[in-house]
Image: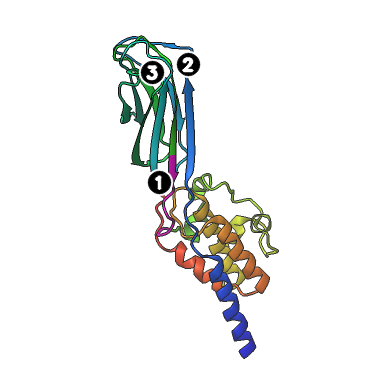
Amino acid sequence: MRRYSIALLSATLALSTILVAVPAMAETSTVSWDFSTGLALVPGNEVEIAQLTLPDPAGSECTAEVETTNGRSVHPGNNINVYLNGGLLVTLQGIEDEPFTTNAGAAGFVAAGSDQLVVFIESTGARITSSAGSLTVTCTPPSGGGEGCTPGYWKQPHHFDSWGATGYEPGDSFDVVFGVDSSFDTLLDGVEAKGGGEKALARHAVAALLNASTPYVSYEYSAAQVMALVQDAYASGYFEGAKDMLEEQNELGCPLD
């Protein structure tokens, strides 16, 4: 009996070790332009020169950095304006005032999700621009945690549309997705399972995987961590520890309709 207790404790500690928090990784997107041969402008107007759509999740902390070098000054003037979702974010003024100089500026913002940045040259006098430059946006996703939808949410047919954002479908093979040899044919079979032991783990494992995979739930664990947790549970034959850890997160509150 003592050996069994020690084995269970060891398995629980191993599973806990897997789920050490992983820092959010920053993602960088860049777009550039080059009008060294000259771009005709109309004084008093703006001309779009670049745009960038970000794959950032809502709540990401982002910094937009714009830089431009004027190759030759034809007439003084001209600004570069960067708009975020239609609102002015940052301006570089007088980029044509001096030749062969670099202008730079930056601004921070919190992502709304699928944000669009558009870069314009605004003519304030010059009729030709020869600037070359770039817009670089770096976003750090928000730390996960605090939300989770239950197996009861994910198994409802009228919520199957929420699966679309996860990359998984109810009919996907449970064993192929998790890399285990289970008693279930599909993910839907797993999330619908009733009972304890392997069945309890299966329903919370599927819910956890979906929570971790949708950008609309701030979930504590990544999909890779959920899979590793489930694989270790099957390897050890001890399902309760993994089930408890996932169940706790799955019941924090569902932000989905």
Kindly identify the amino acid type of the residue bearing the numbered disc 1: Ser
Task: State left or right for residue 13 relative to residue 105.
Answer: right
Query: Label 1's element?
Result: loop
Task: Measure how far apart labels 2 and 3 are at the Cα level.
Answer: 12 Å
Residue density around tag 1, few if under 14, some if 14–19, many if 20 or more, within 10 Å = many
Residue positioned 45% across, 42% down in the render? 56
Indicate which disc, 2 or 3, sits on the residue closer to the N terminus.
Answer: 2
Seen in the picture, residue 243 relative to 50 is either above or below; the reply is below
- Identify residue for label 1: 60
Residue density around tag 2, few if under 14, some if 14–19, many if 20 or more, within 10 Å = some
- The answer to whether residue 37 of the structure is visible from this angle is yes
Residue 137: name its quadrant: top left
Residue 117 picture location, percent across and down = 40, 31
Seen in the picture, residue 159 relative to 116 is either above or below; the reply is below
Residue 186: name its quadrant: bottom right
Task: State left or right for residue 55 relative to residue 226.
Answer: left
Work out which residue is located at the far bottom of the displayed protein and give it.
1
The span shown in magenta is 138-147
Task: Measure how far apart labels 1 and 3 are at the Cα level.
Answer: 37 Å
Main SS category, magenta section: loop
Q: Is residue 10 magenta?
A: no
Residue 237 picture location, percent across and down = 65, 74
Indicate which disc, 1 or 3, sits on the residue closer to the N terminus.
Answer: 1
Q: Which mark is residue 99?
A: 3
Residue 38: name its quadrant: top left
| Residue depth check, mark 1 versus mark 3: number of the one nearer the observer | 3
- Identify residue for label 2: 36
- The answer to whether residue 194 of the structure is visible from this angle is no
Residue positioned 40% across, 62% down in the render? 252
